[in-house]
Image: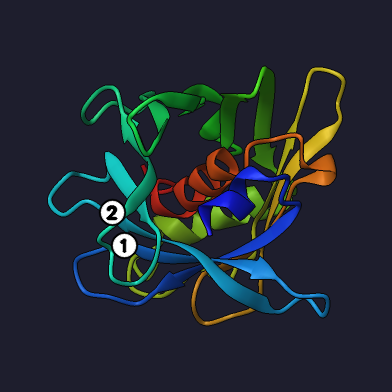
Amino acid sequence: MTAELLQGIERFTVTQKLTLMVNRYEIHSMTGDRQAGHLLAVAQQKRAAFKEQVTFYQDESRTTPIFSFKARQRLDLGATYDVLDASGQRIGTFRKDFAKSLLRSTWHLEASGLKLTGSERNIGVAIGRRIWEATPIGDAVPSPFRFHFDFVNANGEVLMTSERGKSLRDRYLITLPGARLDGRVAAAMAVALDALQSR
């Protein structure tokens, strides 16, 4: 289903699967009634890689890698991540803006000739989430805050949104208005927003 991620997809879902020791995600198309459709890719964080690499596979067998993202540096708070196609060619990059993220998580994303800045939509939720994570139960109990991200270009146009749904598992609706952003890069960024947020 890689072709669908390549061919102007405007909406898909990202859902985290509960597994021990490994972050795993499923990317699905979106049906007309806003439910998850067919499987587009399965993502898995590389074991013992300190969250620096996530590979996306064609299906649950995880035998055919179709794209990935990987940090250029190890254990760097401001690391740049390259999004790579199946042949290892770079198709995009993203990095966390560490200084701005102290108050409100902010990312810089480049792909398809686009330069986008993504940040948490609601500053109140951003602050509340940080307070929650600083409490003794912050690591043991899932955050009650539903955080959303908007990625805009220099003209302020929204070209990607990631909205966290109401679910026990982390589930996100990804919207790409006008399908101007490569769906593989958007899927990589969406997974990173969940897998790397605590870094």
Q: Please report the residue visible at 19 percent of the width from the left and 66 percent of the height from the top.
A: 21
Q: Please report the residue visible at 59 percent of the width from the left and 43 percent of the height from the top.
A: 186
Using residue 120 as the reference point, say whether residue 89 is left or right of it: left
Bin the neighbour count of mark 1 within 10 Å (Cα to Cα): few under 14, some 14-19, many 20 and up.
some
Q: Quadrant of residue 73?
A: top left
Real-space Cα separation, disc 2 to disc 1, in angstroms: 5 Å
Q: Quadrant of the C terminus?
A: top left
Mark 1 and mark 2 in contact (Cβ < 8 Å)? yes
Q: Quadrant of residue 74?
A: top left
Where is residue 70? Give x, y as percent.
32, 34
**Three-letter amino acid code of the residue under disc 2:** Gln
* Picture layout, residue 170 above or below residue 196: below
Numbered badge on residue 23:
1
Q: Secondary structure at mark 2?
A: strand
**Three-letter amino acid code of the residue under disc 1:** Asn
Q: Which residue is mark 2?
A: 45
Where is residue 11? Give x, y as percent.
73, 58
Where is residue 128? Give x, y as percent.
61, 56
Q: Secondary structure at mark 1?
A: loop
Which numbered disc flags the more N-terminal residue, 2 or 1? Answer: 1
Bin the neighbour count of mark 2 within 10 Å (Cα to Cα): few under 14, some 14-19, many 20 and up.
many
**Farthest left residue in view:** 48
* Picture layout, residue 190 above or below residue 23: above
Using residue 170 as the reference point, say whether residue 174 is left or right of it: right
- Examine the rendering and report whether any part of residue 48 can be seen: yes
Numbered badge on residue 3:
none
Where is residue 120? Give x, y as percent.
67, 44
Q: Please report the residue visible at 75 percent of the width from the left and 75 percent of the height from the top.
A: 31
* Picture layout, residue 86 above or below residue 193: above
